[in-house]
Structures are given as structure tokens and as C-alpha cells.
Amino acid sequence: MSDAEHSRMRAHVLDGVRRIYASRSGERLSFSMLSIETQVPRRVLKATWGTIENLLADVVAQLAEPEQLPTDTSSIIKLREYLVMVREMLTNPAISAAVLALVTESKQADYTDAHSESIGEQWIRQFGDLVVPASREDYAHIVGPLVYTHLTQPEPASDSFIEELVAAGSLRLRFR
């Protein structure tokens, strides 16, 4: 398969995943279900992604492609804009469904693909690229409450909650 054919197939399959989640059937995603939806052979899906977890990570990465934050602003402003961007991404139903499925898959999987970067590692790297480098623990303390609020509250996190996270994150990351 050429690079162009592979790219078209990947886009088609990722669109199929979005359609499945948009249907809100509640069924756990499988390569068999996706093969029926997309008419792509199951063996091709398995050869391309290996695990459902890897496929979901690809879906989330594609849907949650971050906008570039301004580079000429303070770290505090970058942190605020990053948290607002995460809040907005989490309100996208396709991203939200894929993130929840990814968390469920990764917790139920008997193994993880040692050759692929976890979605958490991708997000921490992205945070470092857009805001400042941070440890896994720092990221969890700063962004974790935002994700938790999204999962447990009917409304998106408020601007005042974002400001509380910015203040706490600024102290934790030692912004001046």
C-alpha cells in the first residue's frame, strides 16, 4: 500500500470510528465492528494499529490536534490558553467518547504496545511543547482536575475554575 493509499485508508477508518461513536450504540469498539462499518478487512486494521488502544489513541490525537498557542506571551498566559483549549476539546462529543473508550480500553487491556507512546505521554509532551516542560506528576496536578471535572459534572469547567488551576499550576511550575 502506497503512502497516499495508507493515508486515505487511515482517514476513512478514523472517520468510521467517529461515526460509530456518533451512533451512541454503547457497544465496545472492536476491529470486527469497525471492519463492517468501513469495509476494511479486519487483518488490515490489526496490522495497521495492533490494538484497539492504539487505534483510539490515533483517533484522539487526530481529533484533538492542538492549535498553536502564541509563543510571545508569558508562561501563565500559555497555561491559561492551554487549559481553555483542553476544556473546549473535551466538550467535543467525538473526542470525549474516544477519550473515555481509550481509558476503558487501556485499563482492560492485558498488555500495552511497548512500541507506541501512550496517549498520556503524548499529552504531557504536547503540554511541554505548548506551555513548558512538566513531569507526569505536575501534568496530573494541573490538567487532571479539569479532566475529572469534565467526567463528573454536567457543565464544562467554569472560567473561575480554570483561573484556580492557572494559579495552582503557576505555583507548582514556579512561574514568576
Image (tube, grey):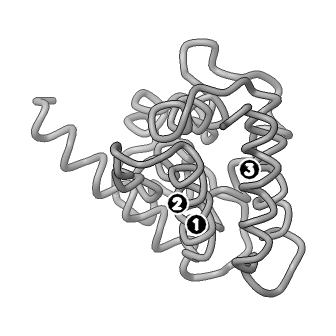
Tell me: residue 76, above or below residue 147. above
Q: Is residue 74 left or right of residue 106?
A: left
Q: Is residue 85 left or right of residue 160?
A: left
Foreground pick, 121 / 143: 143
Q: Could you tell me residue 11's position as x and y percent? A: 28, 54
Q: Are marks 2 and 1 in contact (CB under 8 Å)?
A: yes
- Which residue is drawn at the image coordinates 25% and 48% (left, top)? 9
Q: Could you tell me residue 152's position as x and y percent? A: 89, 72
Q: Which mark is residue 92?
A: none
Tell me: residue 16, above or below residue 1. below
- Which residue is drawn at the image coordinates 77% and 22% (left, top)? 111
Foreground pick, 77 / 155: 77
Tag 2: amino acid: Glu
- Residue where numbered disc 3 is placed: 143
The residue most toward the top is 114
- Which residue is drawn at the image coordinates 73% and 37% (left, top)? 139
- Which residue is drawn at the image coordinates 85% and 39% (left, top)? 107
Tag 1: amino acid: Val
Examine the image and state in which quarter residue 25 appears.
bottom right
Q: Are marks 3 and 1 in contact (CB under 8 Å)?
A: no
- Residue where numbered disc 1 is placed: 84
Count neighbours of disc 2 (C-alpha within 10 A) and say few if under 14, some if 14 to 19, many if 20 or more.
Answer: some
CA separation, marks 2 and 1?
5 Å
- Residue where numbered disc 2 is placed: 81
Tag 3: amino acid: Val
Q: Secondary structure at mark 1?
A: helix
Query: Looking at the image, is mark 3 or mark 1 earlier in the sequence?
Result: 1
Tell me: residue 92, above or below residue 95. below
